[in-house]
Image (tube, helix red, strand yellow):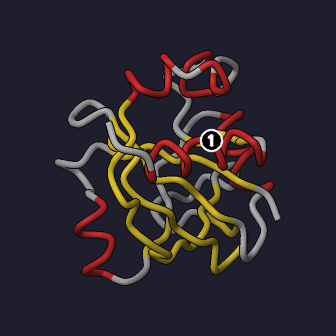
Amino acid sequence: MNHWLVKSEPFKYSWDQFEKDGKTFWDGVRNYQARNNLKGMKKGDLVLWYHSNEGLEIVGIAKVVKEAYQDPTTEETAWVVVDLKPFKKLKRPVSLAEIKADSRLQEIGLVKQGRLSVQALKPEEFDAILDLSSSKK
């Protein structure tokens, strides 16, 4: 199983809306590196959900339920989407400030490549974020 992180602006599509919908396809990716990460996602992979611009925090975990297919919002064949389903809300959100302050997460894409909307995570980075979510601030 692989681990990922996706970024969404909560005013456009929040974790709460995602939970209400029960499933979504992850569209609108127009960066080749992010697109390649979508193509790398496999059914069952876990995906951290990060609220960007507002909140600046990881709020939940989604699961990949359908692998990459043509983005239905464009006719350009270069772009793909994956289907995600809510898996669980984090015990408490993990802020970008906490991530930057944690020595285990200094190489995470969120710190090194902050603008990339779909990022791969190492298992130990994923676990470190879950640890932070379980701990008291």
In the displayed structure image, the side of residue 17 where residue 59 appears, left or right: right
Q: Position of residue 125 (x, y in %)?
A: 68, 39
Q: Nearer the viewer, residue 126 or 27?
A: 126
Q: Quadrant of residue 89?
A: bottom left
Q: Quadrant of residue 32?
A: top right
Q: Position of residue 118 (x, y in %)?
A: 59, 42
Q: Quadrant of residue 53?
A: top left
Q: Given the image, on which type of amino acid does mark 1 rest?
A: Ala
User: Looking at the image, how many numbered discs can be counted on the residues?
Assistant: 1
Q: Position of residue 35 (x, y in %)?
A: 67, 45
Secondary structure under tag 1 reads helix
Q: Position of residue 114 (x, y in %)?
A: 51, 21
Does residue 33 lie above or below 45 as drawn? above
Q: Nearer the viewer, residue 62 or 84?
A: 62
Which quarter of the figure is the C terminus placed in?
Answer: top left
Does residue 66 lie above or below 108 as drawn? below
Residue under the image location 65 percent in, 47 percent down: 126
Residue under the image location 48 percent in, 57 percent down: 27
Does residue 116 lie above or below 130 as drawn? above
Q: Which residue is mark 1?
A: 128
Residue under the image location 23 percent in, 69 percent down: 17
Crowding at mark 1 (Cα within 10 Å: few <14, some 14-19, many 20+):
some
